[in-house]
Image (cartoon, grey):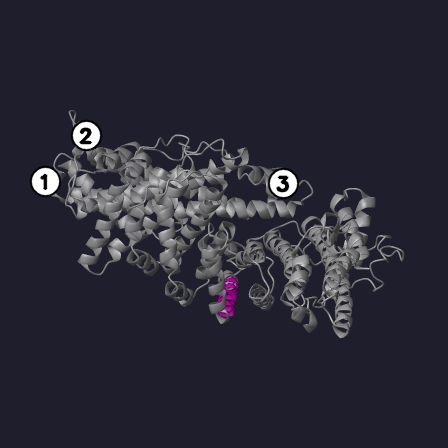
Amino acid sequence: MLHERAWLLKMLALALHISDISSSVYREACMAILYHTFGQCAENFQSTSLIHSHDALTSISDVPAKRNKVLDLLEVLQFRCPDTSTKYPQLLSSLGIESKIEEILRNSATFENGGVYYYSERGDRLIDLDAFREKLLQISQELNSQLTEPEKAGLKESVHHLLKWAWRYNKNLEEQAAQLHMLTGWSQIVEVAVSRRMSLFEDCSQLLFELLDASLNATTSPDCSVKMAYVLTNVSLTCMAKLRDERFICPAGTDSDAVTCLDIISSKQLPNAACNSLLFKLVMATLRNESSEILRRRQYALLLSYFQYCSSILDSDVPPSVLRFLLLEEQDGDDEDITLQKVLKEHNELAHANFSIIRKEAQAIVDLVTKDAFHGSEAGKALSFYVLDALISIDHEKYFLNQLQSRGILRSCLSDVANYLSKDSSLASESSQRFCTVDAQFSLLLRLSHHYGKHGSQILLSMGALQNLSACNLMGGQKKVNPRAISKIVKERTGEIDKRSLITPVLRIVTSFTSLVDSADFLEVKNKIVREIVDFAKQHQSVFNSILRENMTGTNLLTLEQLSMAVSILSKVWAYEENEECSYIQDLFSLMHSLFSVDFGILNFMQSPNMIENQKSELIAFGLCFSLVSYLYVLATRKNMRFQVSYGRNSDQQHPTLQMVSDLLNSATLALERVGEEKYMLLNKIRDLNELSRKEVDEIIKVCMKQDCISPNDNIRKRRYIAMIDLCCMAGNRDQLITLLLQITECAVTILLIHFQDDASAKGLSSFSDELLPVLERLEHLKEDKVGRSLKLFHRSITTLKEMTIRTITI
């Protein structure tokens, strides 16, 4: 009966999969299947004649419609097959033939090849009773001459006992196969319905929760085998992925075509209690007694998917200031702050609840994940380290940090990364998988410094992270590939695993250590940190030279990020380096010379049609300028260095000049005016988005390269929703850039003030002041409403410098 149901479910899944719902006939057929199996469908389809047909799908169940029969079918599947382990009679043991019988059963050959097994049509290996009986009779005949009559009778009875056991073994195996077959059919109709026909359901989130909850319940049941748990976990993964999609699609339940900022922060998410219930059951399923690494890998993936689902609903690229401005336009009074605070409060409560649930089983979870991280397959190791990364990300009391430290996981992880980077092994498929593990280990180490801030960086530093990374061969990251040893597919995968992929996370870790330079309480500690970072830069001089001298024309975000990090590292520590044997000073000055006078609004480094990518590259480029001007600030303030106004005619080497600082100030001023206007226009466009036509909205989506997020059937409201999110991200990027530009401007103004206040340096600045004055006047006219910040202190510094500039001109 289970096999018949399994085939019916598979046929229904196939029908759902291949049907073209643009045809009314196929659409009604799909709705009938969904209505009779899941008990619901969209309201506008519930009147179809097929749904109310008494003959439709009666073979599945006779339960009245509107009941979720899929859940009922899952309950039918939950039974444990009887134990079929062999229990030999005492006589067989005493006669010494138990080992012979075990040898017969261990031989996997079929009866045609001298064994006792045969394979069914479904591929199940069953015992051929006739062949098994012949083997047992053969053993009995060999012993007959040595046995007494009572022993012969006992042996005959034992043979009958073994044949009955073989029959039960076959029967049990058939039941298990039928059970697994029906579960496979059940999983197929669920996954097809969830992944392809979700738009036809009425209450998607509730249905997904019920399916996910039922699957996890079944997985934790003692009647669930490892094979069944694997199938159920795959269903859970599909449902969780769809829940994540549901969370970020345009909110439904309204007849209006308009969207608001409230729609962005009021995303569809299950109640906190439902999320907590799912996490608890997922933890119990992961810690089940019967398990396997393959099953746990799927469960780890499900756990990671759950944490992503529960992550902050506010896009990190959209600052709260932008949301508050938009909410203020939509609501009265202080309601916007109340709404935003309510959303943030609910998210914080969920995060704390998740932490509490995990903490109750922390010992068992960390032990299990750690075991897979260091003793599993490469795929299992990578997922395990990502789980440890996720545990750190939800840690509120440094509890998981202590768990990892006490087990030596972080130190071992750092050692593994250093060993991998030091080797120059060939890139076979195994090495490709190993790279994924190393990437996950880097993710864990970076999470440590990101989540715990300076405390996390201090922990990594105390473990000797810089010494380990200094000893690595980063340029050896681009390993040789034997074209005869690996297939074309492996070549394509390993071709991306070059030194760039390995250098980036290393630079990120070292960058986190630079934050400790200014925050060190004692000079000895500060000097030690500076010395270690300087030694790292010297050890990898070829890497830094390669990055600093990279051609920036047509570059990508990764190259820009590496350049920004390399300059950030050097700008923090190289001012303290007195030895000129390994000096990056000329490279830094060369970058200043080429970047400080650039108008980044006109120059497109990436040469990409994607506006969002271009904005990101501009933000990174100005971050690079900030690191460079910060280096000049350190030279001017702490090293008391004074710069010339401009280059001398016979100067062989490049060096910083006041003209370069003025050029940067002018470039930042132009950018502030332009970016402030862009942000203002973006916010206005968001405010007027509901007035735009479909064509205009599609143009916004096209500019942001988000065409894959919509289909021709999507209505105008969903299109406006996607466009609003993209516009908010762009406005957020402009907001971040304004902050950075103000920091660059303040730094440049301070450097100029130092020189104007220095009597020796102030001489000969008259012509320079003539060029500087118009820039300062433009900065004076910068409006707070355009930049969205208070500019009182900023304008005070500008006014002071302007007065000194005018005084210099008049002298």
Instruction: Determine which of the numbered discs, if any, sits on residue 653 in the image.
Output: 2
Of the residues shown, which amino acid type is indicated by label 3? Ser
- Location of mark 3 (residue): 693
What amino acid is labelled 2 in the image? Gln
Crowdedness near tag 1: few (<14), some (14–19) or many (≥20) residues, C-alpha within 10 Å: few
Kindly indicate the quadrant of the structure image that contains residue 412.
Answer: bottom left
Q: Measuring from the top left, give residue 238's x and y in whole percent.
A: 63, 53
State the extent of the magenta-drawn residues as a range: 341-358
Q: Is residue 60 left or right of residue 393?
A: right
Mark closest to the chain's N terminus, 2 or 3: 2
Q: What residue lies at 51% left-to-right and 53% top-to-bottom?
A: 380
Instruction: Say which label, 3 or 1, has the lower sequence index.
Output: 3
Residue 672 drawn at (x, y percent): 37, 42
In three-dimensional space, the C-alpha distance between marks 1 and 2, rounded to whole angstroms, equals 23 Å
As drawn, is 484 to the left or to the right of 778? right
Tell me the element at label 2. Answer: loop
Q: Earlier in the sequence, mark 1 or mark 2?
A: 2
